[in-house]
Image (tube, rainbow, N blue to C red):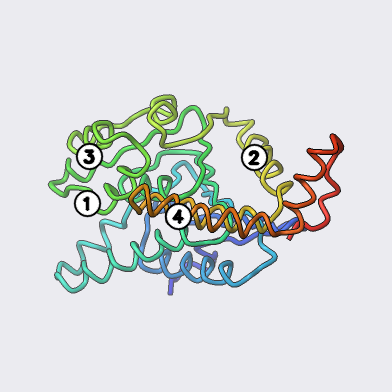
Amino acid sequence: MSSNLAPLVINTRDARGVVTLTLNRPAAFNALSKDLLCALQAELDHIAQDAQVRVVVLAATGKAFCAGHDLKEMRADPSLDYYQSLFNQCGRMMMTLQKLPVPVIAQVQGIATAAGCQLVAMCDLAIAVSTARFAVSGVNLGLFCATPSVALTRNLGRKAAFEMLVTGEFISAEQALQKGLINRIAEVDTLDAEVERLVACIVAKPQLALRMGKSLFYRQLENGIEAAYADAVQTMACNMMDESALEGVLAFIEKRPAKNPTNG
């Protein structure tokens, strides 16, 4: 456990079921130490079992969103077993973000590098301040960012992702928006409000549709197109049996607002 009395991940929750997880190692630029990875994994595992959670916002304290792995900690135990264990632990946490049944929004207030950039890419949505910068800079240290490359190539075009990986150069928030790494840009003083606008839009939608939809979204991406369509057909048919969907279609036909009988 960390010797710091402050929690490594701060969990706040509002009445709507919106959970904000805030990385809290500002002095270390929120580097992903083993303790921080464990703390974040525990929070995500708990959320995965909580049917009342609607949205997760991943935020951070200090100047940086996340500077990747804790290099000092990594260098203290240079063994293959340790590195395999660490990267497996990190990979499991990253996959948990994708497997959560609710949308996850990265609220990026500063730089995101290496595994920190991977963290942004693994969130379903991302909003960054205009001054944020992104890089997978391990190559500058002789370490190709192999695990971040998995996330990047599923967000950016291949050539854009490969350029970041082999140059280690930073890209701006505007470039990240153009390349598909983030969804929106906000100024520092409007970041919270911009995230809230996105959150409010999501929580207004029927929960079952979002849960089914997120699961299908990632499954079909990894399948061939025929299998993807077969999966999508079954998912959409099941979704149509939900009371909210049936009411929504009827309201559209009758040209009236939907009663939204359930939001669960």
**Distance from Cα at disc 1 to Cα at disc 4:** 32 Å
Q: Which secondary structure, mark 4?
A: helix
Label 1 close to label 3 by CB (< 8 Å): no
Q: What's the amino acid at mark 1?
A: Ala
1 and 4 marks in contact (CB < 8 Å): no
Left/right of residue 114 with respect to residue 256 in the rendered view: left
Query: Residue at label 3?
Result: 165
Q: Nearer the viewer, mark 4 or mark 2?
A: 4
Task: Determine the secondary structure under disc 1.
Answer: helix
Mark 3 or 4: the one toward you: 4
Check whether the beta carbons of the residues at disc 2 and disc 3 lie within 8 A of each other.
Answer: no
Going from N to C along the chain, the mark reached first, 1 or 4, is 1
Q: Which residue is mark 4?
A: 230
Which residue sits at x=31%, y=34%? 157
Q: CA distance from mark 2 to mark 3?
A: 30 Å
Which label's residue is closer to the chain start, 2 or 3?
Answer: 3
219 or 156, which lies in front?
A: 219
- Disc 4/disc 2 C-alpha distance (Å): 30 Å
Q: Residues within 10 Å of mark 1 (few under 14, many from 20)?
A: some
Visible residue check, residue 17: yes
Residue 49 location (% of width, % of height): 59, 72
- Residue annotated with mark 1: 146
Mark 3 or 4, nearer chain start: 3
Give the numbered dot on residue 212: none
Give the mark, 1 or 3, whose residue is nearer the N terminus.
1
Residue beneath disc 2? 198
Q: Report the residue at 37% width, 44% height from top.
A: 117
